[in-house]
Amino acid sequence: MNSQTRSELYPSVICLFYYLVAYADGKASQAEIALMDRIATIEKFNKSEFEKQFLIYNQNDRSTTFNKCVIELKKLDNLEQIRILAWMFIISDSDDDFNAKEWKVIQDVLNILDQSLNEILNTERSLTKLLIIG
């Protein structure tokens, strides 16, 4: 997927899910915060727009944000959904603490969507390589 074929919703949906996963336990770790910059760079997002959206979502209750996430995620194509789900795994594992609350958010999304776990994990490996190569 490249930036020309990405839907306009894609950046905001990643931001929504970043917020839900990174702050599932009430606070984001330093590793999760640093990862936001890396995601913005890899996905070629305007970092200030990403941060602005994050502040907006931070003002909503988690249930409202989750419901908005799911609605917006369903509007994306299959490859975008898989890529966002892969980012969710990476965000959750970025601080080497696959937190139960973070995993619950991911499971709730996986239960709603009909996506191949193998495709998600393959995409996660590809994105992890991009993070390492930097």
Image (cartoon, rainbow, N blue to C red):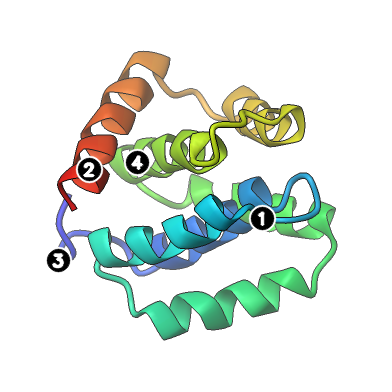
Image coordinates of residue 92 in percent, x first then y, are 56, 38
Q: CA distance from mark 4 to mark 2?
A: 17 Å
Look at label 3 and name its amino acid. Answer: Gln
Is residue 42 in sight in this rendering?
A: yes
Q: Nearer the viewer, mark 4 or mark 3?
A: 4
Q: Nearer the viewer, mark 1 or mark 3?
A: 1
Residue at position x 32%, y 72% in the image: 45
Image coordinates of residue 66 in percent, x first then y, are 71, 50
- Which residue position is annotated with label 2? 132
Is the residue marked by circle 2 packed among few (<14), some (14-19), or many (20+) residues within 10 Å? Answer: few
Q: CA distance from mark 1 to mark 4?
A: 21 Å
Between 36 and 9, the one lying in front of the other is 36
Look at label 4 and name its amino acid. Answer: Arg
- Labelled pair 1, 4 in contact (Cβ < 8 Å): no
Whichever of labels 4 and 2 marks the residue nearer the N terminus, that label is: 4
Q: Nearer the viewer, mark 4 or mark 2?
A: 2
Q: Name the disc covering residue 4, or none.
A: 3
Q: Is residue 21 left or right of residue 27?
A: left
Whichever of labels 1 and 3 marks the residue nearer the N terminus, that label is: 3
Look at label 1 and name its amino acid. Answer: Ala
Is residue 72 in sight in this rendering?
A: no
- Which residue position is annotated with label 1? 28
Q: Is residue 47 above or below residue 74?
A: below
Image coordinates of residue 3 in percent, x first then y, are 18, 64
Q: Label 2, secondary structure: give it.
A: helix
Q: Is residue 15 left or right of residue 107?
A: left
Q: Name the disc covering residue 83, or none.
A: 4
Q: CA distance from mark 4 to mark 3?
A: 16 Å
Residue at position x 34%, y 41% in the image: 83
